[in-house]
Amino acid sequence: MKLIQILGTGCPKCKKLADVTEEAAKALGLEYRLEKVTDIGEIIRFGVMTTPALAVDGVVKVAGKVPSPEEIRQILTS
């Protein structure tokens, strides 16, 4: 099971990243758990300075933008 984490304070871009990521994971048929990390201290511990960010299994894959659905599918399958 993949742990997918959305790092951000809940801004519109953070919500969009969560929605697009969840749609991509469902389309791929992945077993996953989606977690929203909103605590600034925890986000900084990931090394993220610009939100939103996407982490998979504890590793930051994208920060500071909302990737396209295709980019997210590639991230989730790599």
Image: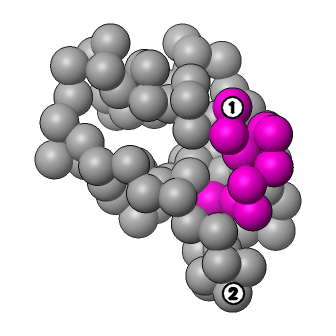
Which numbered disc, 2 or 1, marks the residue that appears first in the sequence? 1
The residue shown at (52%, 58%) is 36
User: x and y percent of residue 53 in the render?
Assistant: 66, 52
The residue shown at (41%, 65%) is 58
User: x and y percent of residue 62 in the render?
Assistant: 64, 45
User: The C terminus is located in which quarter?
Assistant: top left
The secondary element bearing badge 1 is classed as: helix
The secondary element bearing badge 2 is classed as: helix
Q: Judge by depth and name the residue closer to the eye, 78 or 76.
A: 76
Q: Judge by depth and name the residue closer to the eye, 72 or 15.
A: 15
- Please tell me whether residue 13 belongs to the stretch shown in magenta: yes
Residue that badge 2 annotates: 41
Quadrant in the picture for residue 22: top left
Residue 60 seen in the current view: no
Q: Amino acid at mark 2?
A: Gly
| Highlighted range, magenta | 7-16
Quadrant in the picture for residue 68: top right
Q: Amino acid at mark 1?
A: Lys
Q: How is the image coloured?
A: one colour
User: x and y percent of residue 26 in the render?
Assistant: 31, 21
The residue shown at (79%, 39%) is 13
Q: Residues under labels 2 and 1: Cα distance?
A: 22 Å
Marks 2, 1: nearer the viewer: 1
Q: Is residue 77 left or right of residue 54?
A: left
